Amino acid sequence: MNFKESPFMYGLAAMVIVFVLAQSCFFLYKAWKQGKKLGLTSQTLRSTVTSSVLFSIAPAISVVATVIVLAKALGIILPWIRLSVIGNITYETTAAEAALDVFGRSVRDPVENPQQFSAIMWVMTVGCILPLVLLPIFLKKIQKKIGHAAQTNAKLADVVSAAAFIGLIAAFIARSIAGAGTQENPTDGAGTLSLLTLIIAIGLMVLLTMLCNRFKLKWLENFTMPLSMLGAMGAAILLTRYLPAAWLIEWRY
């Protein structure tokens, strides 16, 4: 039996997802009730709910993409559980790759050892617990400090925020350009495939952004990133299938 998709894992996933859905329904009910107290009409509330559902589609596409990326190594269930609660593609892939690197593996290699699978699961889970503990305690103080800094020097606050985001993106770009493979997986290093996939993703993002600006497509703005991700993933699959000699060219081992 595949331990990654065993009845226990399905049961665990069911409990987590039922809890998340119940929590969402609870807060939706409380928000609706509070809206009525504030004098909002049912039509306004329904419109708000509909808008929220539509805006949640774009992040959901990113979630599905992350599950696909991690499924080969970890199966469907564990990424499904993680991304049903608090996970996102930036954290989950980074945490999983960090744990897999310790065992000399990558996200392209199925994890067959239960002990390794358990260790990876704990790394992914424990790594995101600290913010959940710290935020309820220090959130007001953090917000107060950030608000004060933004009011005192708004330009500096914008620069720091932009620098943090650019640094995060640069780390992923560096992996595509100069990431080294392992002895067990020499083709996991940076090479033609990773670089072409990066270029295609950037090109799609630029193209979609230009379309949004040119034709005032506000509804498309929330889909530019997930569509670029999925397009680049599809391109990588096509390159692997139809240009195998090209994508095997790598310069880091």
Image (tube, rainbow, N blue to C red):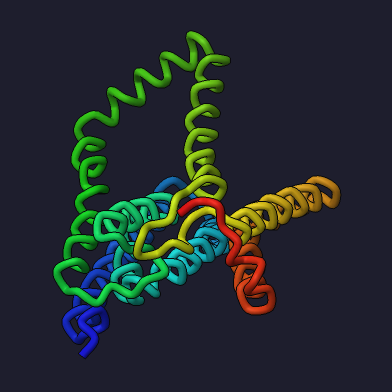
- The image shows residue 205, relative to residue 247, as above or below, that is above
Q: Is residue 189 left or right of residue 200?
A: left
In which quadrant is the N terminus drawn? bottom left
Residue 224 or 146: which is nearer the viewer?
224
Which residue shows up at 48% across the image and 63% down it? 187
- The image shows residue 125, relative to residue 8, as above or below, that is above
Residue 26's quadrant in the figure? bottom left
Looking at the image, how many numbered discs can be counted on the residues?
A: 0
In which quadrant is the C terminus drawn? bottom left
Task: Indicate the position of residue 141 as horizontal and vertical percent values.
Answer: 28, 23
Residue 105's quadrant in the figure? bottom left
- The image shows residue 175, relative to residue 236, as above or below, that is above
Residue 219 visible from this viewpoint = no
Residue placed farthest to the left in the image? 115
Task: Indicate the position of residue 64 as horizontal and vertical percent values.
Answer: 48, 69
Q: Is residue 88 left or right of residue 236?
A: left
Residue placed farthest to the bottom in the image? 1
Residue 27 or 1: which is nearer the viewer?
1
